[in-house]
Amino acid sequence: LTITHPPTTGRAPIMSVGGANIRSSTSPNSPKSDPPDTPSFEKGRRNSSIEKLVVAVRIRPLPSDETERCLHQLDKEKIVVEEADREKEKHLRTKRSSEKQFSYDIVLGEDATQDDVYQATTKNLVRDVLLGYNGTVFAYGATGSGKTHTMVGQSDGKHVGIMVRALNELFQYIESRKQRYTVTMSYLEIYNENIRDLLNPESGFLELREDSSKGTGYVQVSGLTEAIANSTEEVMSLLTRGNKQRSCEPTASNRTSSRSHALLSVTVHNTRPVHDRNVMKTRIRQGRLFMIDLAGSERASHTKNIGKRLKEGAHINRSLLALGNCINALSGSNSNKYVNYRDSKLTRLLREALSGNCKTVMIAHVNPGLTHREESKNTLVYAAR
């Protein structure tokens, strides 16, 4: 395991081939190889200016201390939410339905396993990243709705989360190929609009710097640690170390509530020989997978937060609103619509993860318990924008 800052000079110019990030250089003795694969991108049901934007909803199991439900899965794409008692009375008086229905690309019910979630949402992203594309998967929802369980999970094989499963598949593919791959990773958190390196927390708060090589408005984190890893075990060792540094505090909704957004970035560099008009060249492809565990959205009246916790909640909600506005703009039919990434550090950082050749999956999490009705409904409204 090597922790380093990869060199940024001496590389061939980057080219976009079918949306993939590819560099080429001449090599006189490279053997002939197969032509590049094609991406698995396909348009979702949404008319999106992102290559594909998929919105999934996962319903966590009913908490043991609750007996009544506020929502249920109708089919593989629909969820129904029961109206509150006073709204039910209003609907009955007007002879209208007392239920609110929401539709998404994917709905995963309470019996969905960790593998079910991975297969339905993230598996294809790994293949596309290996082909030189960017992929993003992020978990959204109220505190205690199951976001960290989906993304990180538990240490045993059956309950590991998306991060471990994606890394396992990535390294298994690399080991089966004769091409040369290099995998680097970084892990950071955004807490109260401050950026911390979870692999090197002693470095203090880090600053965003404009990255002119990617175009106007793109940024990089100055001084962020990048670790070169050769296996899932190495990455998970770093993740475990980083997760211990995350800002977590007890709230009325969750005894170990994550008070920060955590962003894991895994970059795959692939060097392969190609034959072009009797000249052997080396082609370098770079893909990046962003896996994000967002802090829980919440209402101050429900969490009973005061002082420091209240300030944290305000920062969390403000950044989540900015993210929702960006996704809403990107998923619209007008591809020329202005997308404001500058409203929060979260969206500034995620500009590369949401735009260009990136395939994005949002997994919204809801709690079916009756006492969580308002938070769950707010999450469903957010995800349906």
Image (spheres, rainbow, N blue to C red):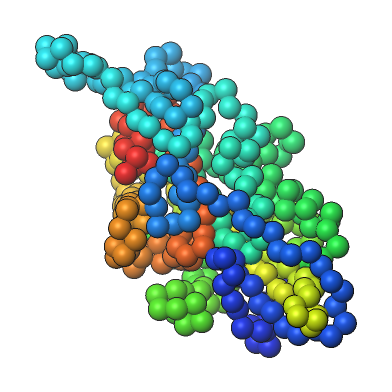
Classify residue 377 by image quadrant.
top left
Q: Is residue 158 left or right of residue 318?
A: right
Residue 118, horizontal then vertical, whole percent: 62, 39
Residue 88, compared with residue 216, is above or below; it is above
Residue 374, compared with residue 231, is above or below; it is above
Classify residue 128 by image quadrant.
bottom right
Residue 78, horizontal then vertical, whole percent: 41, 27
Q: Work out whether residue 130 or residue 6 is closer to the camera in this orientation and state it.
A: 130
Q: Is residue 216 left or right of residue 1?
A: left
- Give the mark count: 0
| Residue at 70%, 73% in the rendered image | 284
| Residue at 75%, 78% in the rendered image | 276
Q: Work out whether residue 317 or residue 336 is closer to the camera in this orientation and state it.
A: 336
Residue 298, horizontal then vertical, whole percent: 35, 41
Q: Work out whether residue 279 or residue 143 is closer to the camera in this orientation and state it.
A: 279
Could one spot residue 255 in this view of the protein? Answer: no
Q: Point out the image quarter for the N terminus.
A: bottom right
User: Furthest residue to the left?
Assistant: 93
Residue 124, horizontal then vertical, whole percent: 62, 47
| Residue at 53%, 24% in the rendered image | 110
Residue 304, compared with residue 345, is above or below; it is above
User: Furthest residue to the bottom?
Assistant: 10
Residue 66, compared with residue 249, is above or below; it is above
Q: Is residue 384 left or right of residue 65?
A: left
Could one spot residue 67 in this view of the protein? Answer: yes
Classify residue 34 by image quadrant.
bottom right
| Residue at 62%, 32% in the rendered image | 116
Q: Point out the image quarter for the C terminus.
A: top left
